Amino acid sequence: MDLLANLGLGFAVALTPWNLLFAFIGAMIGTLIGVLPGIGPIATIAMLLPLTFHLEPTAGLIMLAGIFYGAQYGGSTSAILINLPGETSSVVTTLDGHQMAVQGRAGAALAVAALASFFAGCVATALIATFAPPLARLGQSFGSPEYFSLMLLGLIAAVVLAHGSVIKAVAMIVLGLLLGLIGTDGNTGGQRFTFGLNELADGLDVATLAIGLFGISEIIANLANREAHRDVVTKRITRLWPTPDDFRRAWPAVLRGTSLGAVLGVLPGGGATLSAFAAYALEKRVSDRPAMFGRGAVEGVAAPEAANNAGAQSSFIPMLTLGIPGNPVMALMIGALMIHGIQPGPQIMTDRPQMFWGMVASMWIGNLMLVIINLPLIGFWVQLLKVPYRFLYLAILMFCAIGVYSVNNSTAAVLIAALFGVAGFVFQRLACEPAPLILGFVLGPLMEENLRRALRVSGGDPTIFLTRPISLGLLIAAAILLLIVALPAIRSTREQAFQE
Amino acid sequence: MTDRSGVLVPRPWRRLLHRDVLAGLMFILVAGLGLWVSRDYPVGTALRMGTGYMPRLLCWLLLGLGAVIALRGLRDPHGVGDGPIQGTAWRPAILVATALVVFGLALERLGLIVAILLLIGLGALAGRNLRPAETVVAAAVLVALAWAVFIAGLGLTIPVWPEW
């Protein structure tokens, strides 16, 4: 069977010592930044992106992927032990996880979180292996009009699923599209928004932008707020193994969380955070003891932790098969591919099977490593939580600074990152989400290219987007999504969902 | 702009401090700047798009969105929605950005070590509760770490010492 042969190839690639090492490094870094509040996977991946240039692309991608799903594991540790989410995707885990810890069941909560994540990781890996090839085949039949419509749908879906105000998210996308225009216009050779600066002729770099918007601005925001008091549960974690009753209650929750996360992760704008929130809300609704939620219900840990890991991994599907990023991390992954001169899109699977399947196989291996990294080594991570932020931010600042310089050995990049650091802080104060901006930035140039090509094919007739069935279907889907957001009834449930 | 019969609008300009109003104004400002910069870009037609077609289209779009956001903020009766903006601590923003700028300008001339020391020195001012002795220790550790990771480990071609 094809699938087995492909996975065999993948494991052969992933199990080479070199790739194993990078899967391990990725998982370790991911856990590290996951545990530490104040630095997230987006900033970390952006910082390390330039370094992958020195690696073979497969090893680099394996490492970056490990950081992303490793952060989902690590995030739960600080959520449970210090009631402070290490990542936004583990915000809901604080509700019940920390309660469990207060009741002296920290060990059980950590174990449930790790095992739930592992189960979800296995399922998500299997899903990628199963569904990626047919999707890529579908993608290969797409022409420019289809791609344009698909990207439009992706951007609109990203808005619908984003937090907060819809219209602000749209404006942020447009801002991202505009930033994506900076540089030399590939079709006419004209300079756009370069202000006559040579440094801008090639456009902004996605890593620079992401380090500024997510790394630097996060530092500023953390310093602007008072240092949160960290209440580490210092009781020795004696019992790591959950009780039989925990297992009985957790496993259906894990199944539901995994399925929900896997579906939401594929959608643009989805991914880990949304999945975790949705899974918690669902669990509360189907539970036979909703009153227990917020008081240490094991389901409230199991479901969101399964969901965030499933969501993190399944969000690779559209990126790997269609070249469409659903969230900022995937946008950076596309950046990583482009650093190596690899054009993202459906041809990756056929042109570079080693890379594709090696990465899929490494995800499973990485998840296995993470269970080991997280459970027996938990004492080490707890110690790490005692490092105060006033030391941490200096290290983060330094890695951001050197990372951004090394993108292309450019002083200008450091200055641009500083500018976007301040801009990101302003956005945060004005409640404008930066994630849609990054998506717009990455998709903008691709959309423009496909739009131009499609219009050239049709001789300038815009109805080409409506006469090709797949394109029409995608546009209708986009229109339905917009309509849904506009309807007040659904808008209120959406707000409710984000409130919970 | 709207006539509010209540007494809740003592100083009209306070409404401008609403998050949405400020956000809208920010988008309008950026769009306006974009339109001004791209004023001479050839626009072309849909079939043969010029350099300026997309930029101007998107700027107008952003301008419209910004206006709607700002108006909705103004109409927001009690600042519910996202609420009015609170006083903001600008000190860390300015110091962190300055630290980065200084680092960037220093790196190629003064080398990695001096640049990091400057970065840490200015960065430490941005936080409030870092003691001088702690800063010195942190700087020493971070310089060693940066050298180990980036120079010894990854072999980046960054000058380490000042170039005379």
Image (cartoon, rainbow, N blue to C red):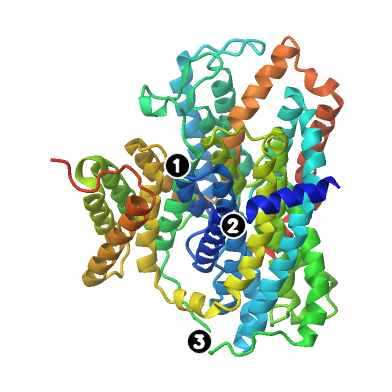
Q: Amino acid at mark 1?
A: Thr
Q: Amino acid at mark 3?
A: Thr
Outermost residue, left side = B164
Measure the C-alpha gap from mark 1 to mark 3.
39 Å
Image position, residue A466 (x, y; %):
82, 23
Element under disc 2: helix
Of B87 and A215, which appears nearest the observer? A215
- The residue that appears at 20% across and 45% down in the rendered structure is B110
Q: Which mark is residue A23?
A: none
Measure the C-alpha gap from mark 2 to mark 1.
21 Å
Q: Earlier in the sequence, mark 1 or mark 3?
A: 1
Whether residue A140 appears in this view of the structure is yes
Residue of label 3:
A234
* Chain for disc number 3: A
Q: Amino acid at mark 2?
A: Gly
Residue A224 in which image quadrant: bottom left
Residue of label 1:
A208
Measure the C-alpha gap from mark 2 to mark 3.
29 Å
* Chain for disc number 2: A
Evaluate if marks 2 and 3 touch, with contact meaning CB atoms under 8 Å apart. Answer: no
